[in-house]
């Protein structure tokens, strides 16, 4: 309907303005590194810093692993709750919202305390520490992971699909990976975006567990006293994160054909 | 095994699940074990110090002083302001986010517009803390780009007219920057579930758009809408760095109070900090109950 | 389905291992024959050379809360690394003193790279370090030249550097540089004066309130005149409630900031004229000096490296590196007396007379002031939003 078109574009336009003006203001400031003229000096100094690329790679790897672990944990859980144990839903939802109220610093010190001695001595090795970091990030991303996947599942009729698949003789693996998951693409992508953004920007867990190996602490360190470089770094990390998400989106949507739900609206 | 975890965690204030024992007949709780186990190992156990510490003093003796300390007017006001700003931004973000998401999903946008905006929302949803505060200072601060622009070009001096970025509303507008994208990302899958056929069918039966929404669209979406808004609420409730960087403690928020006690350059009473966090858990539990009650009513409609 | 998940988790662990190994570096505690964690001085273990060797065997040092632009710690760390061949693992440079203490406590059982070996905390935290057993006693070789009122007699903590508060002014945005506290109230500074922190979380900010108190007839025991000053500042519209950072100073949002001298002077160098920075120690009142403390963690996984770090910091070389960052090292008077400060470095510092008349609050005074300010900031200054 033509009327709708107007409102759609209206909302998109207003939102675009709202989102881009502050970014533009940051960008504008970052160009002022050389007094009185616009220059890319701040960006030059950023790109030449080797720590930034190294830490970006590390954090991206951690991010991907966090996404995988998070989805692996949550998709079956949400599915199960919807299908078999709806009464446990408030419990799962409440737990998923808890990370909002546990300050990151309490979480990281707690993780260190619990897993630094005895049989679970994870902090003494790099592998163990990285695993702890990933687990911590899954926890931090839990609210977003749960909500995205739950919203996605609400849009498909899990019960009917499962029954149909079972009546056709499918086992759980097939149901999960060939029936349910393909219909959750959009939700899983959303969850992946949110998780990656969190991991790349996160500071507290990273800085106490792995220090300057991760992107967040490096950004802090580099931008700490340097006004223009800090803004340049914000713009750069924004763009990089955006591109990474574009990649995930591309990879994720490539297999979007063949889903049972009707196509794009 | 069924109730062991909840017994171990008996020092906490989580609401216990209604009656898991009844389900053990059908082993239906088994599937959530991995999740509960993971959450226990990496969230609840490490946070135990939070709960235990709320009831201790700095020497480790049991005390209720921290909890009592929560009931000063100053701290209660902090809770109230935090709840208010969370509700405000959850509603604002929820409503605007919904319209934006709807526009993106059904508006017949070219797919590149949709993809790039969705991925942008992914990035923006976590754009918070110092960079976000600075971006808004650069835009709407006293010498911000937009402030100066409006003054020079339109003769409109925001600050003369009483606008102040460093205020409750300034902070809300800033929070919206991550609330809005979060809403978009989370509600989109649910909107995609709105079958086009339903709308066409409604039109064929002579329904106006308003009637469609009132009788079909909103009721179907309501559970997800509510779920998304509680997420936004929690997101805002736990936000710390943005508020600190923008208003420097001027606005009395619980997370800032916690930070000042635990980070402790000046004040250093981590036990009070833990008690404050415990209070936040309680508030969250209360909001969850309200949400759950609302959601049950909305889902009732959907049950066949 | 669950077996599949188990397999996937195993796979994930392998992937993690691969990732980790590729990013893996060196590090790990050695096993020196002498247990340096019991050493109260270098002599206990056979002298500085034995200490350096033991540290080298340990291979690394873990620090916390050391931003590179604070007192030139960047260069201090690099010099240490080059001189002794050790890796330095830097934890949270943004940590507050409370965070550092919590980090030591959380890592008591941990010998991994998350446990800090050494601490740099605010002066007021000295007693807590002893009470809670956070630090181990250690006296550096140059112990005797550290002023007595800035160190614990047994070496549980000792002052490392100090600075005084003043105004950091971005002269590009301010025509007349304010010279006194009273100046700040003038209408020409409307919307221009800021603190570098929240008085409840930042030591720097609370000292600013104390300094304002001293300039207006108050004292550390009674900082209310300081609160009143900020109330007036806020009512006049001169106070900007933003936490000032490099970006807000450079953009002109907070052109006048009450700051430690070393931070302001470092900013002056970093900005290199973009914008121009002038640092002013206000003429009225008494300059407030802030001392920070060093300590060796009682649970340090690398005890020899921790002690070597202290020896380095308190050597002339270390002290002068701090001075290069505009922080007055604690042995400043000794360095001056022995004439080891290069002339060009001395020329860059603010005039010595201002330091001579600076007041160094004691722990009790700090505690007293802290209580009054933090409890009354919101109500008196009235900048709180309901």
Image (cartoon, coloured by chain):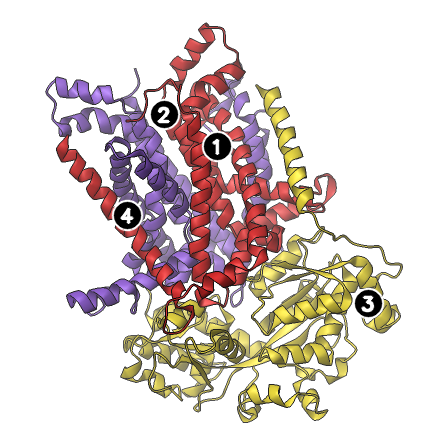
Cα separation between marks 4 and 1: 44 Å
Observer-side mark, 2 or 3, equals 3
Q: Is residue B172 visible?
A: no
| Left-right relation of A238 to C52 | left
Cα separation between marks 4 and 2: 29 Å
Q: Is residue A220 visible?
A: yes
Q: Quadrant of the C terminus of chain A?
A: top left
Q: Looking at the image, do the residues carrying marks 3 and 4 touch, with CB atoms under 8 Å apart? A: no
- Judge whether C383 appears above or below C13 on screen: below
* Disc 1 crowd, CA 10 A, few/some/many (<14, 14-19, 20+): few
Which mark identifies residue A16?
4
Viewer-nearest residue: B81 or C337 = C337
Q: Which SS class for mark 2?
A: helix
Q: Looking at the image, do the residues carrying marks 4 and 1 touch, with CB atoms under 8 Å apart? A: no
Cα separation between marks 3 and 4: 59 Å
* Disc 4 crowd, CA 10 A, few/some/many (<14, 14-19, 20+): few
- Asked where in the image residue B102 lies, by quadrant, the reply is top left
Viewer-nearest residue: B200 or A23 = A23
Tell me the red chain: A
Identify the chain of the residue marked 4, using the numbered disc in the image: A
Which mark identifies residue A154?
2
Q: Are marks 4 and 1 on the same chain?
A: no
Tell me the yellow chain: C
Q: Quadrant of the N terminus of chain A?
A: top left
């Amino acid at each position: 309907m033509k009327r709708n078109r107007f409102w759609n574009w209206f909302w998109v336009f207003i939102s675009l303005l709202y989102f881009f003006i502050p970014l533009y203001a940051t960008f504008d400031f970052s160009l002022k590194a050389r007094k009185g003229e616009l220059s890319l000096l701040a960006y030059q100094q950023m790109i030449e810093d080797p720590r930034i690329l190294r830490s970006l790679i590390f954090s991206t790897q951690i991010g991907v692993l966090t996404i995988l672990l998070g989805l692996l944990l949550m998709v079956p859980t949400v599915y199960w709750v919807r299908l078999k144990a709806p009464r446990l839903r408030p419990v799962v939802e409440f737990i998923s919202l808890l990370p909002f109220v546990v300050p990151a610093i309490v979480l990281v010190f707690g993780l260190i305390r619990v897993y630094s001695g005895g049989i679970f001595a994870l902090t003494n090795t790099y592998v163990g520490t990285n695993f702890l970091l990933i687990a911590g990030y899954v926890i931090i991303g839990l609210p977003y992971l749960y909500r995205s996947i739950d919203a996605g599942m609400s849009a498909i009729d899990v019960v009917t699909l499962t029954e149909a698949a079972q009546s056709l003789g499918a086992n759980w693996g097939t149901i999960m990976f060939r029936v349910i998951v393909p219909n959750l693409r959009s939700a899983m992508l959303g969850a992946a975006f949110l998780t990656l953004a969190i991991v790349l920007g996160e500071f507290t867990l990273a800085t106490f567990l792995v220090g300057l190996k991760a992107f967040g602490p490096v950004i802090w360190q580099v931008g700490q006293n340097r006004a223009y470089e800090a803004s340049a770094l914000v713009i750069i990390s924004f763009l990089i994160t955006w591109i990474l998400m574009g990649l995930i989106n591309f990879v994720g949507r490539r297999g979007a054909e063949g889903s049972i739900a009707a196509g794009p609206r | 095994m069924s109730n062991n975890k909840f017994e171990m965690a008996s020092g906490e204030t989580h609401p216990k699940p209604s009656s898991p024992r009844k389900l053990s007949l059908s082993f239906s709780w088994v599937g959530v074990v991995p999740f509960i186990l993971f959450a226990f190992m990496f969230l609840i156990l490490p946070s135990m110090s939070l709960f235990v510490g709320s009831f201790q003093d700095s020497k480790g003796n049991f005390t209720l002083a921290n909890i009592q300390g929560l009931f000063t007017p100053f701290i209660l006001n902090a809770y109230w302001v935090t709840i208010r700003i969370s509700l405000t931004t959850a509603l604002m973000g929820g409503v605007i986010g919904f319209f934006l998401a709807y526009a993106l999903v059904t508006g017949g946008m070219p797919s590149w517009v949709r993809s790039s905006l969705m991925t942008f929302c992914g990035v923006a949803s976590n754009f918070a803390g110092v960079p976000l505060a600075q971006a808004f200072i650069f835009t709407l601060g006293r010498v911000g780009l937009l402030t100066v622009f409006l003054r020079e070009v339109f003769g409109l001096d925001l600050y003369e007219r009483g606008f102040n970025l460093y205020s409750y509303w300034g902070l809300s507008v800033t929070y919206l920057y991550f609330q809005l994208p979060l809403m978009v990302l989370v509600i989109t899958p649910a909107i995609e579930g709105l079958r086009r056929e339903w709308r066409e069918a409604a039109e064929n039966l002579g329904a106006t758009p308003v009637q469609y929404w009132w009788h079909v669209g909103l009721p179907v979406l309501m559970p997800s809408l509510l779920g998304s808004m509680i997420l936004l609420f929690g997101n805002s409730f736990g936000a710390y760095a943005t508020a600190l960087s923008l208003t420097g403690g001027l606005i009395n928020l619980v997370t800032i109070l916690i930070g000042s006690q635990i980070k402790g350059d000046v004040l250093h009473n981590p036990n009070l900090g833990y008690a404050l966090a415990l209070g936040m858990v309680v508030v969250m539990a209360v909001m969850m109950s309200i949400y759950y009650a609302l959601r049950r009513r909305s889902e009732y409609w959907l049950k066949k | 389905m669950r077996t599949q998940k188990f397999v996937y988790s195993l796979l994930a662990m392998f992937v993690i291992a691969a990732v980790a190994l590729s990013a893996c570096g060196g590090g790990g505690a050695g096993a020196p024959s002498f247990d340096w964690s019991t050493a109260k001085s270098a002599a206990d273990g056979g002298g500085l050379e034995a200490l350096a060797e033991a540290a080298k065997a340990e291979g690394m040092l873990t620090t916390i809360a050391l931003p590179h632009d604070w007192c030139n710690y960047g260069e201090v760390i690099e010099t240490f690394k080059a001189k002794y061949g050790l890796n330095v693992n830097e934890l949270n440079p943004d940590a507050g003193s409370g965070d550092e203490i919590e980090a030591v406590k959380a890592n008591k059982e941990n010998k991994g790279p998350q446990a800090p070996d050494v601490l740099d905390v605010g002066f007021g935290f000295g007693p807590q370090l002893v009470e809670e057993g956070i630090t181990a006693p250690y006296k550096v070789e140059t112990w005797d030249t550290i002023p007595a009122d800035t160190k614990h007699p047994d070496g549980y903590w000792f002052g490392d550097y100090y600075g005084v508060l003043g105004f950091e002014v971005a002269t590009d945005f301010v025509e007349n540089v304010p010279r006194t506290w009273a100046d700040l109230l003038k209408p020409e500074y409307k919307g221009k004066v800021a603190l570098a922190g929240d008085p409840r979380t930042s030591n720097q900010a609370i000292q600013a309130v104390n300094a304002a108190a001293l300039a207006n007839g108050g004292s550390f025991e009674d900082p209310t005149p300081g609160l009143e000053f900020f109330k007036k500042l806020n009512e006049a519209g001169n106070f900007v409630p933003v936490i000032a950072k490099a970006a807000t100073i450079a953009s002109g949002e907070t052109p006048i900031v009450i700051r430690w001298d070393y931070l302001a002077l470092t900013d002056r160098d970093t900005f290199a004229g973009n914008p121009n920075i002038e640092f002013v120690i206000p003429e009225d009142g008494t300059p407030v000096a802030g001392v920070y403390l060093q300590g060796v963690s009682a649970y340090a996984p690398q005890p020899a490296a921790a002690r070597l770090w202290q020896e380095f910091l308190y050597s002339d070389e270390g002290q002068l590196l701090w001075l290069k960052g505009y922080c007055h090292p604690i042995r400043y008077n000794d360095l001056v007396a022995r004439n080891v400060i290069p002339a060009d470095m001395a020329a860059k510092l603010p005039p010595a007379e201002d330091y001579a008349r600076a007041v160094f609050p004691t722990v009790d005074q700090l505690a007293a002031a802290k209580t009054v300010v933090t409890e009354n900031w919101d109500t008196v200054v009235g900048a709180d939003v309901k």
